[in-house]
């Protein structure tokens, strides 16, 4: 199946799995069995909030295509997956704050110390045994905790005498009995049992206003672009900017409101929330010893596609002219600069993801400079159908290898050990296997792929840099380069889709990667991920205000009936709501309306359903230059409009108020009556012409019946056969 836009769901892909708990049309269910074209679902007891009718728990069959359609329109919500390691009734890890995770890590350090002592036979598992060896236990736990704090502060591996600022620390437990309670909880429920419930009590919001946060972030982002300046230097810059702003506010008449100046802890916490931390690397001597003396086993064995995916980076042994022509005309000058399209000649870095079972390339990203999001974008691409990319370069085959991997193998390099990567994979229920850094034999498949790309693709073009100066000789790659970035990406995709995927592989018993993928898809099937999950994991988080027209993101209005009911009915709603916006699907956003509740809201205009940010950029490019209305005409019209509106407001003050306690509900329903959104178009029944059928007045009354399953809304009402009353009779009679 080939299409002109990216697709997350194709034949064989279902966004649910056996044991997954989901919500559909506000009713919760659990998948009991996955079949060829449908799923067996067990629905929970449901109370219709509109009528109060109670529907008992039942089992039902839901078609796979119905799951996909509801997922496309934001109606499917995955509550819990069996591999996500979240017990029923517990908060999902994605809802936990950094402070909650830090407190859990603090307890886990002392639990790890207790496990070590019990394993070594130095302490009994009883409460009395913990208390008896309390001094040794607390000391070892404190050592683990200090090591964790050094790792978080980037102080691990510094030379002796270097200044270390570990930030705020928690004191050691007062009694070993507390550690025993943590230890027992960990044995019952793992790390999730070590989370506290402090977030449910008290008002723990940040004391800084949104204006203060925005001002601090503007300074932090500016200083982080420089040569790895210290945190104290950034703090000094933030304080200086706040001091200047407060002086300006104090000099006005009347004096303006003074801003609360952030301190060191606030700036450090904000920086740590963004930047991943680096770890020490292995020495060259240790690498050489492992390379020459390590033992080889049978190797990695897999039984199905996407069971194991390996990801690594490779710098091309080839010079490329970083200039985008033709295909990127719709990019602005600053956007070209962000992508590195400055016309210089440099080597580019490839981040690739390979499926071990089929040897197919399931993800690929190219970077022209230093970037920390290359791994995140590569993991995101594994879930995407890449056929539109193949179509764009004129490939003869489809690039439809995508789905949800069960395990991703990464090395322990500095770009792969950040907390962002761990949380991302944990939220998707993917096993993260970290191989030691600088040991390529532990990731043999992706390393062999890079060699194949080098020998089969890179060596065909002029501008090779060679592996060392001896092999390069007098060859000047910068002077001989003739390949632009457009041409490089074009032929790289053609080589992957039409050549590499269709070349017989010895490790696949002579089959090609494309043949192995098709056979594995037929035999074992592939799992997909719902758009809501991808939106909350890979999406961009922003705060937006909610008004009568819904929520606006990127000049697109998002509005549904449920969102407007929340707007009119909730008197305690916050002024701004957290919104998750995903560039690959701008037709739907996720809005956080409660501490543990997200709402999927579709665009009011159905033209944006299924569209991406690139589609929006193309529309913006077409609209540039079409604004022919002058500023003088607009200013005159706005002045006349404001004058007329003011006159109407003054005259309106002479009339009584028409909204009373008795008429409020009617006006609220009228406000939502004629609202046209993509959600209402999707839920509307099939259109029937007035004269298509004749209603039997003796039949059952319309609307009578019970709604036993949420999927009943999917079935369109069957049209009755027209009744012929005679050839000569008038139709109106």
Image: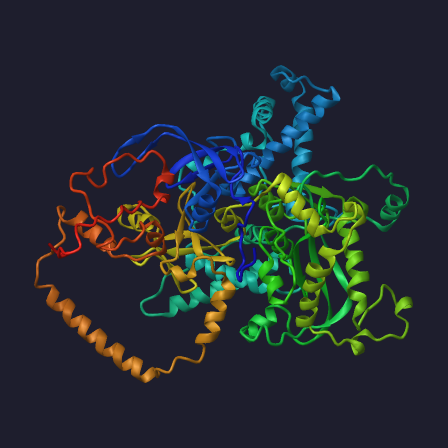
Residue 502: x %, y % from top left? 72, 56
Residue 96 seen in this snapshot: yes
Which quarter of the picture shows residue 235?
A: bottom right
Question: Residue sitting at 67 percent across and 76 percent down?
Answer: 343
Which quarter of the picture shows residue 455?
A: bottom right
Residue 422: x %, y % from top left? 62, 44
Q: In this view, does 690 lie above or below 168?
A: below
199 horizontally vs 506: left or right: left
Which quarter of the picture shows residue 250?
A: bottom left
Pick the front one: 648 or 391: 391
- What is the image's colouring? rainbow
Residue 205: x %, y % from top left? 42, 46
Q: Is residue 196 above or below residue 98?
A: above
Counting labels gives 0
611 horizontally vs 698: left or right: right
649 horizontally vs 252: left or right: left
Pick the front one: 19 or 420: 19
Pick the front one: 530 or 555: 530
């Amino acid at each position: 199946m080939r299409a002109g836009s990216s697709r997350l769901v194709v034949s064989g892909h279902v966004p649910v799995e056996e044991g997954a708990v989901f919500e559909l049309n506000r009713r919760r269910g659990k998948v009991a069995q996955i079949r060829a074209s449908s799923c067996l679902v067990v629905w929970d007891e449901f109370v219709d909030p509109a009528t109060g009718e109670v529907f008992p728990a039942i089992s039902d069959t839901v078609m796979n295509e119905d799951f996909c359609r509801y997922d496309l329109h934001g109606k499917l919500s995955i509550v819990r997956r069996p591999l996500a390691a979240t017990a029923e009734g517990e908060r999902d890890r994605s809802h936990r704050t950094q402070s909650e995770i830090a407190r859990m890590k603090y307890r886990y350090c002392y639990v790890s110390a207790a496990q070590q002592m019990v394993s070594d036979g130095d302490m009994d598992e009883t409460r009395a045994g913990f208390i008896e060896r309390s001094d040794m236990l607390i000391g070892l736990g404190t050592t683990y905790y200090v090591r964790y704090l050094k790792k978080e502060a980037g102080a691990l591996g510094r030379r002796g005498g270097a200044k270390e600022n570990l930030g705020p620390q928690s004191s050691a437990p007062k009694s070993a009995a507390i550690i025993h309670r943590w230890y027992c909880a960990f044995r019952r429920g793992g790390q999730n049992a070590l989370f506290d419930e402090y977030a449910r009590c008290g008002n723990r919001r940040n004391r800084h206003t949104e204006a203060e946060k925005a001002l601090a972030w503007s300074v932090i982002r500016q200083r982080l672009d420089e040569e790895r300046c210290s945190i104290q230097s950034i703090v000094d810059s933030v304080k200086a900017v706040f001091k200047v702003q407060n002086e300006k506010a104090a000099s006005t008449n009347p004096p303006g409101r003074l801003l609360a100046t952030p301190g060191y802890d606030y700036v450090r916490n904000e920086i740590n929330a963004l930047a991943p931390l680096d770890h020490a690397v292995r020495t060259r001597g240790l690498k050489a010893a492992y390379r020459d003396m390590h033992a080889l086993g049978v190797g990695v064995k897999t039984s199905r596609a996407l069971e194991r995916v390996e990801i690594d980076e490779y710098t091309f042994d080839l010079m490329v002219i970083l200039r985008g022509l033709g295909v990127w005309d719709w990019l602005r000058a600053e956007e070209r600069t962000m992508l590195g399209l400055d016309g210089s000649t440099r080597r580019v870095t490839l981040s690739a993801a390979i499926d071990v079972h089929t040897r197919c390339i399931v993800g690929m990203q190219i970077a022209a400079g230093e970037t920390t999001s290359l791994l995140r974008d590569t993991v995101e691409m594994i879930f995407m159908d890449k056929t539109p990319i193949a179509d764009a370069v004129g490939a003869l085959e489809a690039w439809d290898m995508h789905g949800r991997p069960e395990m991703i193998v990464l090395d322990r390099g500095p770009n792969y050990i950040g907390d962002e990567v761990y949380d991302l994979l944990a939220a998707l229920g993917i096993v993260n296997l970290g191989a030691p850094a600088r040991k390529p034999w532990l990731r043999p498949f992706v390393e062999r792929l890079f060699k194949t790309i080098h020998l089969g693709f890179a060596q065909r073009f002029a501008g090779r840099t060679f592996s060392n100066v001896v092999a390069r000789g007098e060859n000047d790659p910068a002077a001989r380069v003739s390949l632009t970035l457009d041409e490089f990406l074009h032929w790289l995709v053609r080589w992957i889709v039409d050549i590499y995927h269709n070349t017989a592989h010895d490790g696949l018993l002579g089959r090609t990667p494309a043949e192995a993928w098709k056979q594995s898809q037929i035999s074992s099937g592939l799992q997909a991920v719902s758009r809501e999950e991808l939106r909350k994991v890979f999406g961009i988080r922003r705060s937006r205000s909610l008004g009568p027209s819904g929520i606006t993101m990127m000049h697109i209005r998002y509005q549904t009936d449920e969102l407007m009911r929340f707007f009119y009915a909730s008197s305690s709603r916050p002024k701004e709501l957290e919104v998750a916006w995903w560039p690959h699907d701008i037709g739907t956003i996720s809005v956080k309306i409660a501490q543990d509740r997200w709402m999927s809201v579709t665009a009011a205009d159905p033209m944006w359903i299924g569209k991406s940010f690139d589609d929006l950029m193309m529309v913006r490019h077409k609209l540039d230059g079409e604004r022919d209305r002058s500023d003088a005409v607009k200013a005159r019209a706005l002045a006349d409009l404001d004058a007329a509106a003011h006159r109407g407001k003054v005259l309106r003050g002479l009339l009584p108020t028409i909204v009373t306690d008795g008429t409020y509900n009617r006006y609220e329903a009228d406000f939502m009556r004629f609202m046209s959104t993509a959600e209402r178009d999707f839920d509307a029944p099939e259109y029937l012409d007035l004269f298509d059928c004749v209603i039997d007045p003796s039949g059952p009354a319309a609307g009578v019946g019970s709604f036993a399953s949420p999927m009943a809304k999917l079935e369109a009402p069957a049209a009755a056969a027209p009744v012929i009353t005679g050839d000569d009779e008038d139709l109106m009679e």
